[in-house]
Image (cartoon, coloured by chain):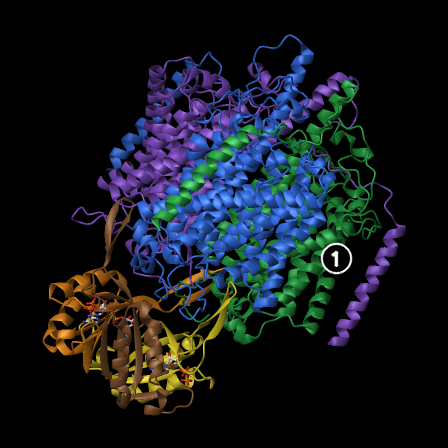
Chain colours: A yellow, B orange, C brown, D purple, E green, F blue
Amino acid sequence: MKKIEAIIKPFKLEEVKDALGDIGIEGMTVSEVKGFGRQKGHTEIYRGSEYTVDFLPKIKIETVVGDSQLEAAVAAIIKAAKTGKIGDGKVFIYTVDEAIRIRTEEKGNSAV
Amino acid sequence: MKKIEAIIKPFKLEEVKDALGDIGIEGMTVSEVKGFGRQKGHTEIYRGSEYTVDFLPKIKIETVVGDSQLEAAVAAIIKAAKTGKIGDGKVFIYTVDEAIRIRTEEKGNSAV
Amino acid sequence: MKKIEAIIKPFKLEEVKDALGDIGIEGMTVSEVKGFGRQKGHTEIYRGSEYTVDFLPKIKIETVVGDSQLEAAVAAIIKAAKTGKIGDGKVFIYTVDEAIRIRTEEKGNSAV
Amino acid sequence: MKRLITLITLGWVMATGALCLAAEEAKPDIAPAATAAAATAAAAPVDPAKAMLENTSNLRVGLDTVWVLVTAMLVFWMNAGFALVESGLCRAKNCVNILTKNFIVFAASTISFWVLGWGLMFGDGSGFMGQSGLWFLGGADNSPALGKDYLSMNPFSTTEYAGVYSAINWTPVPLWAKFFFQLVFAGTAATIVSGAVAERIKFSSFLVFSFLLVAFMYPITGHWIWGGGFLGSHNFRDFAGSTVVHSVGGWAALAGVLVLGPRLGKFGKDGKVHPIPGHNMTSAALGVLILWLGWFGFNPGSTMAAGNGSAIAHILVNTNMAAATGSLGALIAAWLLLKKPDLSMILNGCLAGLVAITAPCAFVSITNGAIIGFIAGIVVVLAVLFFDKIRVDDPVGALSVHLVNGVWGTLALGLFYDNQIATDVAGLATKLSRAEQFMVQLKGVFWVGLYTFVGALIIWYLIKLAVGVRVTPEEEIEGLDIGEHGNEAYPNFQSVGGK
Amino acid sequence: MKRLITLITLGWVMATGALCLAAEEAKPDIAPAATAAAATAAAAPVDPAKAMLENTSNLRVGLDTVWVLVTAMLVFWMNAGFALVESGLCRAKNCVNILTKNFIVFAASTISFWVLGWGLMFGDGSGFMGQSGLWFLGGADNSPALGKDYLSMNPFSTTEYAGVYSAINWTPVPLWAKFFFQLVFAGTAATIVSGAVAERIKFSSFLVFSFLLVAFMYPITGHWIWGGGFLGSHNFRDFAGSTVVHSVGGWAALAGVLVLGPRLGKFGKDGKVHPIPGHNMTSAALGVLILWLGWFGFNPGSTMAAGNGSAIAHILVNTNMAAATGSLGALIAAWLLLKKPDLSMILNGCLAGLVAITAPCAFVSITNGAIIGFIAGIVVVLAVLFFDKIRVDDPVGALSVHLVNGVWGTLALGLFYDNQIATDVAGLATKLSRAEQFMVQLKGVFWVGLYTFVGALIIWYLIKLAVGVRVTPEEEIEGLDIGEHGNEAYPNFQSVGGK
Amino acid sequence: MKRLITLITLGWVMATGALCLAAEEAKPDIAPAATAAAATAAAAPVDPAKAMLENTSNLRVGLDTVWVLVTAMLVFWMNAGFALVESGLCRAKNCVNILTKNFIVFAASTISFWVLGWGLMFGDGSGFMGQSGLWFLGGADNSPALGKDYLSMNPFSTTEYAGVYSAINWTPVPLWAKFFFQLVFAGTAATIVSGAVAERIKFSSFLVFSFLLVAFMYPITGHWIWGGGFLGSHNFRDFAGSTVVHSVGGWAALAGVLVLGPRLGKFGKDGKVHPIPGHNMTSAALGVLILWLGWFGFNPGSTMAAGNGSAIAHILVNTNMAAATGSLGALIAAWLLLKKPDLSMILNGCLAGLVAITAPCAFVSITNGAIIGFIAGIVVVLAVLFFDKIRVDDPVGALSVHLVNGVWGTLALGLFYDNQIATDVAGLATKLSRAEQFMVQLKGVFWVGLYTFVGALIIWYLIKLAVGVRVTPEEEIEGLDIGEHGNEAYPNFQSVGGK
Ligand SMILES: Nc1ncnc2c1ncn2[C@@H]1O[C@H](COP(=O)(O)OP(=O)(O)O)[C@@H](O)[C@H]1O
Ligand SMILES: Nc1ncnc2c1ncn2[C@@H]1O[C@H](COP(=O)(O)OP(=O)(O)O)[C@@H](O)[C@H]1O
Ligand SMILES: Nc1ncnc2c1ncn2[C@@H]1O[C@H](COP(=O)(O)OP(=O)(O)O)[C@@H](O)[C@H]1O
C-alpha cells in the first residue's frame, strides 16, 4: 500500500476529489496547510508598514491506496490539479506498512 | 521505529489520548483534518439553495513509537476509538528512519 | 529522497524557515498542530471551574529533500529550533518513494 | 455596444431636460402636503387661554412620549445584548441557533403581547388578571388623558381618563406608547429563558414556550404587581421589574433547565464539572455593554414620563452605580475565590447588579444602590458555583443573574427602603418600615415564584410529551446550527475540537 | 534612577502645592463663562406675555429638535447595521473591503449631500428639481420659522417662514437639524448598493458611483416626492422612503449587479446555484437588530417633530409590528419551502417588513401594518429564490429586501390607505379611494424606477468604460481585502477552503 | 410520571381558578399606587399663574434633563466603541484582557469620580482645584436652580442657585444628571490609556492607574478649564474636551507607553518596523461607528441643555462633518503615501476628525469644521508613521488620535475662532482675535500637557517600583488572556501563527 500526499491549490480541491472518485478512490483525508516554495507570497500593509506574507494557503490531500491503484491515482491528481502556473504543488509517495479500519479491524488493502 | 497515524472521530480524542497514556505513550501530535470516506457528509441550506458538505471533521493523531510498543499502541487506539458506526476512521503505520529530540539531540527510541 | 517532519515551537517558525533557506531549501509545507508530550499544558478557569488544556500549539514543518541534503537540513532545523527548554519538539525522518512536481510532472530530486 | 450606451445616455439626458421644462410649466399650484405630525387642530380654537393650555399640554405629552419611546427603544436594544451574551457564552456550533432564538423571540412576543398579553396584564379585571379589553388592545381608552389621582403628571391637561386600562392611567402618554414600552419588557422576560436552555433545546419547542409565556404567564403575574392586582395593591413594590420581568424569566428558565437536563459532557461521572467555554468573548462583552446601556432605558424609562427630570436622573445614577459595583464585586469575588479575574464572571456581575437594582432603583439612596449592586456581584459568583455544584446546567448564568438577583433585588427594596425617596422618586410610598416592607416583598417573591415555576414546569412537560424538548444526542454533538437550521455560523474559519 | 524619580516626584508635588496657593490668591474675579446653549436672549424682553410665548416657542422647538436629532442618530446608526449585515453575509476574504465601503460611503455622502444634494432636493425650483440655494445650503432660510400652512406645528411661534427651502418649511426645527436628518437618509440609499455589488466591485469605482448617486440621482427623485416635485404634488405618498430611499437604492444596485455580473463560482455551468455562505452570522444578526432599532428613527423620526406624541407612537408601533410579522413570515415561508428555518432568510424577512412599512406606516392601521409586514416576509423569500433562478447574483439579498419590498410597500400604501389615519397621523390625506391611491402609487413607482434604473445603468457603464468596475479574477479568488486594501480581516484565525 | 403531571396540572389550573374568584371578591379598594415620576407637588398651588410658571419650568427642566441623559448614554456607549476598536486592533491572544480592561475601567471610574473626582473638579475652591463638597457629591446644591447670570437658560424658573458646585450652575438640570454626564467624560479619558498600553501591561497595574487618573489627575486639569479654574477664567476654551478629555488621556497614555516600552517583536534590531495586525477588523470598524455615534452625545450634549435646538444642531453637524472629512483625509493620505486605502488608517482618521472638532465645534463654522477634520485625517496618518519611526509602540493609534489631534483641535479653535458663533452657539465668547485666542489655547495645551505628562510618569514609575507594570515575556508570548485571566477569547477557532 502506498500513501499519496498531494499539496495543491485550495480551489482545486473539488476537482481533485471528483477525479479520484471517478477512478474509484473514495477515502481521503484533507488538511489546510501553508506552503512555501517558488511561488512568492504577497505584500500586505498595515498602518503604514509593509510586511510579506510568505506562506500561501494550500490543501494537503492524503490518500492511502493499494499498489495497483497508485499510478492511476497519481495521474488523476496531477491532471486535475494542474493549472500550469507556478505554485501548483507537489505529489509525494510513501510506503505504508499497514492500514487498519477501526470500525471492523479489517487490515491491508480492504481497509483503505 | 514506526509512526502510527490514526484518523478518528473528534469526540474520541480524549479517550484515545488516555488509552495511549495508560500504556506509557506520552508523546503525540494532533491535527484537525477533514475526512472523506463512506460516511457521507450532510446537507446544508443557505438562502434557499442546498449544498453538500462532503468533508467531515476528523482528528489525526500521529505518534512515533518504538517497534516494541507498536502492537499495544495500535490495539489501544482501536479499542478507544471504536464506536462501531461508520466513520470511525483508519489507522496507518509507516516506518520511521530516524527520530531526534531537538532539545537534547537524542536520537532513535530514546527520542520519542 | 527523505521527508523531514519537524514539530517545533510556533515562534521559531521564521528562524527555521530562514535556516533552511540559507542551505538552499526553499520548499516546505507548514501546518498548525497541537502537541502533547513532556511539556505540560496550562490550566484555564472558566466560570469557576478549572480545566487543563493538555495540547499545546506547535508547528509542523514538512520538507522533502534529496538524500544529500538530509544531514544539513536536519542540523539547520535543530540549530534554529532549539531553546533548550522542554517542549522544543522532534524531528522525524521518512523515506519518500517518489516526488512529482504537478506543474511540470518532473519527478525525483528535481521535483523537490 | 458603446454606441448603444451613447444613445441611451443621450436619451436620458434629453428626457431629463424635457422633464425639467415640462415640470417648470406644470408647476404644482397646490403646496406640498404637510406632515402635521402634531395632531394639533389646524383650526384655531376660540379661547386663547384654553388654546395655550392645550398647546402646552401637547408639549408635555410630546416630551413624555419622546422619553417613553426612546427608553423603550433602549430596552428593545437589549435584545441585541442578550443575543450576543448568550451566543458568545455558548459554542460556535450552536451560535446560529441561539441567534435565531433570540431574534425570533421578540417577533413572537410582539404578536402574543398584542393579541392577548396586554389585555391580561393591564385590562381592568380582578386582582388576579385583566378581563376587559383583552384582545388586540381593543378596549376603550382615551390616553393620554390621566386618571383622577394623577392629574399632576400633566397639569396642563383638562381631560380625565376614561377607559378599561386604568391600571396604567398614571402616565400621560398615548396608548400605543404605553403598549410599546410594556411590550419590550415582556420580550425581555422571554429572552432570559433562551440562554439557560441553550445548546440542547429544540427550536420549535422553545418558540411555543415563549409564545405561551408572553401570552399568558408573564401578563398574569405582571397584572398582580403592575396591573392593579393583589400584590401591587398590598404594598408590594417592584419599580422596573426585578420580579415582574427578571425573576419570572428566571423561574421559567429554571423549570426548562430541569426538564431538559444538562448538556452532554458538562458533568463527569465522577461529579467533576467540565467547563464548556463560550466561543466568543468579544460577543459576550459587547452584549453586556449593550445591556448596561439598555438598562438606562429599562429603569429610568419605567417612570413612563420625564417629569421634571429629578426622578429619572436619580434612577439612572442608581442603575449605573449598581452595574459598576456589581462588576467590581464579581471581580473581587472571582479574584479571591478563583484566583483570576474571569471576564465572564465580571460580565455576570454587572448584569447581576443591574437586575438587583431594577426593583429598588426608585426607593433607595445612591449609596444603598451601590451596596445592593456590590452584594449582587458577589452573590452571582457564588450562585454560579452553586448551580454547578447541584448539577443544574445553565450555560450563560441566566439563573444566577436573573433569578437569584431578581429575588435579591426585590428583597433589597425592603431592606433599604426609604420612604422619602419612595415619595419623591417613585411616587409610590408605602409608609411601611423596612422590616414590614421586607416581609411584603418576601411574600410577593414567594407567590410569583410558586405560580411561575409550577406553571412553567407544566407547560414544559406538556411540550415534552407532545413534541419533545431536547434534540437528539447526535444533533447535540454535531451542533444545533446544522441540525435545526442547516446553517453554520462561521463557515470560513477552521473550528477546533470536536466539542 | 530611583533618586531621580524621587526628585521629580517631590518637584511635582511642590509645584502642585505652589500652584494651589498661587491660584488661591489670583482667584479669578470674572465668573466662569457660561455655556448659554440656549440662544435665548440674555436681555429680558419688555412684554412679559410675548416673552413667555417666545420662551415656550423655544421649548417647543427644542423638543422637536431633540426628537429629530435623536432619530437622525438612530438612522446614522443604521450604517453600522448595514456594514455588519453585508460583511457578515459575505466571505471573510472580502470583509475588510465591505467594511471600508460601508464606512466611507457615509463620509462621502456627507460631503456630496452638503455640497449639492440638499439643494437639488429641497431648493425651490421646478417640479423636476431644486434650483435655488443649490450649493452648501447657501440659500436664505429663517428656520425654525414655519410655513403659513403649518403654523399649528409650533403654535407659540410668531414668525413666518421665508426662504428658498420651502418644501421643508413644515417642520419647526433649525436648518442644520433638517439637513442632518435628510443627510442620513441619503446615506442609506448609497449603502444599499454596497451589499448587492459586494465581493467583486472595485473600491474606487464604488466610491465614484456613490458620490454621484447622492449628489445627483437621489436628490432628483427625492425632489419629485418630498421636495415639492411633480409626484408629491400629485398625491403620490411615501411617508419615510420605501421609494425615495429603498427602491432608489435598489434600482441603482440592480443596475450595478447587471453591469458587474455574478461572482465567480456562484452559478454552475449546469445552471446549478452554488450557495456562498456568509462568513459571520453573529455579524449578520447583530446588524439586523441594529437596523431594526435604527428604523425606529427612520419612520417615527420622519414626522420631524414630536407633536403631541400620538403620531410618533402610532408609527413606531406599526414599524415594530411589520418587522415582527416580516420575520415570522419569512420564518414560516423558509420552513415550509426550504425545510429548515434559515437564519439569513429570517433576517431578510425582518428587513423586508421594515422596508415595506416605511412608506405606509403613517397611512395604515396597526393591523394592516402587521399584514403588510407578513406579506413582505413571504415575498422576500420568493424574491431571493427568483433572483437566483434568473442568475442575478446579489450576495446579501439587497434587491429582494430594498427593491422588491420598497415597491411592495409603496403599493401597499395604496391598497391599505386609510384617510382618517392619513389625516391624524401623517397629516397628508389625499382623500382618494384605495384603488385611486394605488394607481397613483403605481405611477410613482414606475417613474422613479425608470429614471433611476436607466440613470444608474448609464453611470455604471461610463465608470466601466473609464476605469472598469470589476476586480481581476485573480483578485476575486484571493479576496478583495488583500487586493484592494492590503489587509486581512482576521489574520489570527485559520481560514477554511480556498473560496 | 404522566399521572403526576396530570395531577399537578389540574391542581395549578384549579388554583388559578380559585385565585381568580378570590381576587374578584377581595378587589382592592385602594387604587394602584401611582408612579409620580414627576415630583410635581400633588397639592395644587394657590396662585394659578405661579403654578403655570412652575409647571412650565418643570417642562423646561424635564426636556433639558432628557437631552443631557440621552447624550450621556451615548457617551457611555463609547465604552463599547473603545473596547471594540482596541481589542480589534490587537491580537486574539490578548482580546479577553483588553475587553476586561475596557469594561472594568468604567466601573472603577464610576466609583472614583463619585467618591472624589467630581468634588475636585466642580467643587468651589481655588483656581487650581475644587475644595468644597469634595466627597460623594456631599456639598450643598439646589440644582436645577440656575446661577444668577444664567437665568435665561430656564426663563420659567424662579429660584436662584445656591450651593458649592457653582462652576456648573449654568445648566438647568438636577445634580445627578450633571454628575452622570461628567462621569461618562471622565471614564472616556481613562479608556484612552487602555489601548496604548495594550498587549503588555499588567491588569492590576492598569486598574490602579485608572483609578488614580479619574480620582485625581483628570479632575484637577478639568477644574482648571471647566471647574472655574485658572485656564477657563483666562479665556482658554475647550467646548467638549479635546484637551480636558482626549489629550489628558493621551498624555497619560504616552507616559505609560514610555514606561512600558514596545511590545516584543514590534521593532526589529535593524530598526525595521514589524507590523502586528489587529485580529478583528469587524470589531474595529463597528467600534469606530459606535464612537462616531457616541460623539453625537459627546459634543452636542456638552451644551447640557437642549435650548431652542439651534446650538445642538450646529454642533452636531460640525461633529459629523469633521468625522467625514477626517475619514476622507486619512483615506487620501493613506492611498497616496501607502499605496492602498488601509482600513485601520481610515478608522483612525475618523476618530482624529472627531477628537479635533471636540474643542472647536461650538466656536467655528461648518465649513471650518470640515477643514479642521480634513487636516486631522492627514495628521493622524503622519503621526502613526512618526511614532513608529521614533519606536514608540502604540498598538491602536491612541496617541496619534487622542493626543496629537486633541492638541490640534484645541489649537484649531484659536485658528478658526469666530466670535459670532462663540456667542450664538457656545455662549462663551472671548472677543479675542484669532491670533490672541490661538496663543491662549497654546498656553493651555502646554500647562495641561506638562502637568498630566509629568504626573502620569510619576504614577507609572511608582506603580512599576511597587508591583511592576509589565507582564513577563513568557506571558506576553503566550498571550495575556491566559496569563491574566485564565481565559481564551475564541476557544472554538484554530488560531494561526505563534504570535
Ligand atoms: N520540498 C518540499 N517539501 C514539501 N513541500 C513542498 C516542497 N516544495 C514545495 N512544496 C509545497 O508545494 C507548494 C508549491 O510549490 P512551488 O515551488 O510554489 O510551486 P511549483 O511546485 O509549481 O514549482 C509549496 O507551496 C509547498 O507547500
Ligand atoms: N484511503 C484513505 N486514505 C486516507 N484516509 C482515509 C482513507 N479512507 C478513509 N480515510 C479517512 O478515514 C475516515 C473514515 O472513513 P469512512 O470510510 O468514513 O469510515 P469507515 O472507515 O468506518 O468505513 C475518513 O473520513 C477519512 O478521513
Ligand atoms: N512520540 C511522538 N510522536 C509524535 N510527536 C511527538 C512525540 N513526542 C513528542 N512529540 C511532539 O513533540 C512536542 C514536544 O515534545 P515534549 O515531550 O513536550 O518536549 P521535548 O521533546 O523537549 O522533551 C510535543 O508537543 C509533540 O507535538
Height in image: B75 above or below D489?
below
Q: Is residue A81 left or right of residue D67?
A: left
User: Subunit of mark 1?
Assistant: E
Kindly identify which residue carries mark 1. Answer: E216
Q: Is residue F467 something one can see in this rendering? A: yes
Please tell me in which quarter of the rendered image ligand 2 is found.
bottom left
Height in image: F424 above or below F411?
above
Which residue is at a point 68% across and 48% down the rendered structure image? Answer: F415
From the viewer's side, name the closer residue of E426 and D422: D422
Query: Which residue type does callout 1 highlight?
Result: Phe
Q: Is residue D108 something one can see in this rendering? A: no
Q: Quadrant of the C terminus of chain C?
A: bottom left
From the viewer's side, name the closer residue of F52 and C72: C72
Which residue is at a point 53% across and 21% down the rendered structure image? Answer: F141
From the viewer's side, name the closer residue of D425 and F158: F158
Q: Quadrant of residue F39?
A: top right
Height in image: E69 above or below A56?
above
